[in-house]
Image (cartoon, grey):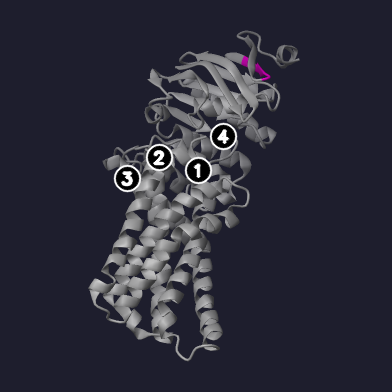
Amino acid sequence: MRLYFQQVRAIIIKDILVELRTREASTAMLVFAVMSIILFNFALRLRVDSLKPLVPGILWVILVYAGTLGLGHSMSIEQINQCIDGLLLTPSDRSVIFVGKAVSNVLFTLLISLVVVPVLAILLDESLLQPGVILTVIVGVIGYSGAGTLISVMAASTRAREIFLPILLFPLAVPLVVASVIVTSGFMDAIPWADYGSWFGVVIAFAIIFWTAGVLLFDFLVEG
Amino acid sequence: MLDALNITKSYGMRPVLRDVSLRVTKGEFVAILGPNGTGKTTLLRVCATLIKPEKGQLVVDGVNALTEANRARAKLGVVSHHTLVYPDLTAEENLQFYARMYGVSDVCNASSPGSDTPIDMVLRRVDLQHRARDPVRTFSRGMVQRLSIARAILHNPPLLLLDEPYTGLDQKSAHALSSLLNELALAGRTVIMTTHEYGRSLDGVTRAVILKGGKVAGELCQDISAERIEKLVG
């Protein structure tokens, strides 16, 4: 078990080091997120007087799209020099690779949310900045990264992986996005917990299901 | 050291390996030769546990590699014609990463003050100690290949598998690689190498196995020369 966590930690450290050197994923995700906020701000104000009711939806659409950029990049660094084979050749349980990559994806997406949430709060609705919303973002990102890491492995072996990843992932992510938007709205509007607490259960269940699936199925997915 | 029995592998309807058996004893330096597309890389990937055969058995140093793949992988060092190293990390960082993945302890700690760490020793072995802190993307092809070998021997595996290791190397780098492989073989490591080059890459080889059409077409244990191999390959 100690070796398992050492290997997971090694993958996370490696991904962070690569990102610190290149800054490819974080820059792309950040620029995309900020430009999306600006575009939403301009485009939606043409039809509505206040964007406050739309803020939870805007937040999660941005996080999903920016997160998908990060997921694609995360697998692409393993395709360079066929490094994925280097990982598969190590005497580790294959789920180590899934857990390590998924945790890295969580960290990078949460890094982007550190910018997106405050910027949206300043521009559109300051009630976004509260512990309940932050907790929802964390759990939602964990769930999305788990599902995304699993799907990105499936897409990685295809030629049009940049297209296949969102095509496969977005339909799967609909329950998570719906639940996350409802829960975020609930916290922002100070609605009684009983009215939306079960949706938070959906967010948690999504995370548990896809992380469990990743741990159990990763070996099968990468098997040649 | 390695027992591959009746290995059969197809991709879709196309058979790639047909009932291939290969037995390699400890200390041998075996070259698997044959023209492109004859199944050499597939056979090596099966031996490396990267792909599973449809039929057959594989035992690596006494471990059933098909049912206990993790235990078998600990006994293998693999050098592919892909480098398997991260270009944006330094040589040292790449080796630290793989050392942690292989469970090599104390990779950054020297056994005594002033002596080399395990990573320093491996880098010195492949003559890359002076480039330890440089990003791999600044390396030449020959240097990257030497780093790949360093990665493969870091955990001291008894069996080395090399897939077309001379690909893309100039004469000087190929000669350096050949010397290094001979050194590793002489040190008691078992080496299995695939190549489609019948000349320089056969230095130190103790047995040549010729693959043709996914089957073993012949073997040479003595007088391993390009001419004799060409005759067997046809």
Give the residue number, with chain letter if any, for mark 2: A94
* Distance Cα–Cα, label 4 vs label 2: 20 Å
Q: Nearer the viewer, residue A165 or B157?
A: A165
The x and y percentages for residue A106 are: 39, 60
What amino acid type is highlighted by mark number 3?
Gln
| Closer mark to the observer between disc 3 and disc 2 | 2
What amino acid type is highlighted by mark number 1?
Ile
Dots 1 and 4 on the same chain:
no
Give the residue number, with chain letter if any, for mark 4: B80
Does dot 4 land on a helix, a strand or a loop?
Answer: loop
Q: Is residue B183 above or below residue A146?
A: above
What amino acid type is highlighted by mark number 4?
Ser
Q: Is residue B127 visible?
A: no
Q: Earlier in the sequence, mark 3 or mark 2?
A: 3
Q: Which mark is residue A195?
A: none
Q: Is residue A59 visible?
A: yes
Give the residue number, with chain letter if any, for mark 1: A84
Residue at horizontal 31 percent and vertical 66 percent from the top: A199
Give the residue number, with chain letter if any, for mark 3: A6
Please report, as a chain letter, where disc 2 is located.
A
**Magenta stretch in the rendered image:** B209-213
